[in-house]
Amino acid sequence: MAELTTLESLLEMGFDRNRAEKAVVNTGNQGIEQAMDWLMEHENDPDIDEPYVPPAGNVLGGEADSQSGEDQPPLANTAEGAADGDCSLIEEALKHPMTEEERREQVKRLEELMRIKQAERRERERAEEVEREKQRRRQGQELQQIRQKIQDDDMKKIADQRRREKMEDKLARQRVKDKIARDREERAQKPTPPSPSSPTGQGPPPSKKEYDESRIQVRLLDGTTINTVFKAQEPLAAVRVYVQVNGNTPEGQDFTLLSPYPRHVYTEMDMEKPLKELGELQGGCALWKVYSKSGFGAFSCAGCDQKVRTGGSALGAYLTTTSTPETPEPDWSRIRVAIC
């Protein structure tokens, strides 16, 4: 029984002649298995169905062929000769032609071989796809770890910054408390000046007295009071800081000071002005309040004879100043409150 050539086998299996010729030529006519492998690997090539064109040196009758005629076997046609490259097989096939049954058996064996090759190829592609998916997941996990590390570093920086800001704020408050404590100690060490004797006769009208310090009393929201003495040259901001540190004002809550008579709402521009410049060291009783935004009320104080409109449904926090530390504090029991 004569065996089919590689080209004939591919044609019997139903492959297009252009594809079969290219497979035989590109595999060097090494056999049907190599040709089928090449066809399955290049079946999606854009030029797979174009006719095979052999190199110019292999064309019969050409100059290159005339020079190497001894090496090139005579072929019936150019495409088939380039594809087979083995004239002996063709001659053997012509001498011993295959019967129809032998041909069907040969085709059956080749089709079975092709199915095996296709199954191997599908298995190989599936394994490659699994490996690509594993690689993609590994890259995704690595990218997620990098993103998480960057996020953790950013959160750590933010937390460190907040801790530094909190520590700086705590130190600033401590400095204010230390300054207030030193001022109290200095005032406690000063001798008490003797009380002036009453004049026996009518003398010249007394000149306006200048004071260098003032006692300020604060009534908080819960009804308790705090008070201390401030220097005449201390800014209004010192009073504000004293209320923030020693009062029960929640941290971060802002408030505004108001003087009822003459009526004046102190702004941020007034915080750097000294108490003397603001006129808070005059004789008599002056009243301040912590300004609220909802509702209003009114109160009067025995000793100042002034009525003050207040904000909020509660009395709020009030600042009461007197001329000197020796001036008695107002009688808070006589304060009359009317909520409007």
Image (spheres, rainbow, N blue to C red):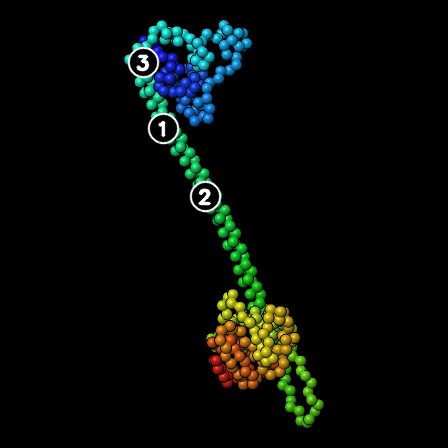
Q: Position of residue 198 (x, y in %)?
A: 64, 90
Residue 248 shows up from this direction:
yes
Q: Is residue 78 left or right of residue 182?
A: left
User: How far is the residue under mark 2 from the one under mark 1?
Assistant: 31 Å
141 vs 269, left or right, is: left
Q: Residue at x 62, y 71 (%)?
A: 270
In the rendering, which numbered label is found on residue 144? 2
Q: Residue furthest bottom?
A: 201
Q: Compute the Cα span from label 2 to label 3.
A: 61 Å
Residue placed most toward the observer, 209 or 153: 153
Q: Mark 1 highlights which residue?
A: 123
Query: Mark 2 or mark 3: which comes first in sequence?
Result: 3
Question: In the rendered view, does 316 fall on the left or right side of 261?
Answer: left
Choose top left, top right, bottom left or bottom right for residue 107.
top left
In the rendered image, the vertical position of residue 191 relative to residue 145, given as above or below: below
Q: How many other residues sit within 10 Å of disc 3, few (<14), some (14-19) or many (≥20)?
A: some
Q: Nearer the viewer, residue 56 or 271?
A: 56
Front-most of 144 and 122?
Answer: 122
The kind of residue on which mark 3 rests is Arg
- Which amino acid type is marked by label 1? Glu
Residue at image point 46% right, 19% down = 51
Amino acid type, residue under disc 2 in the picture: Gln
In this picture, is 165 found above or below 301?
A: above
- Badge 3 is on which residue? 103
Residue density around tag 2, few if under 14, some if 14–19, many if 20 or more, within 10 Å:
few
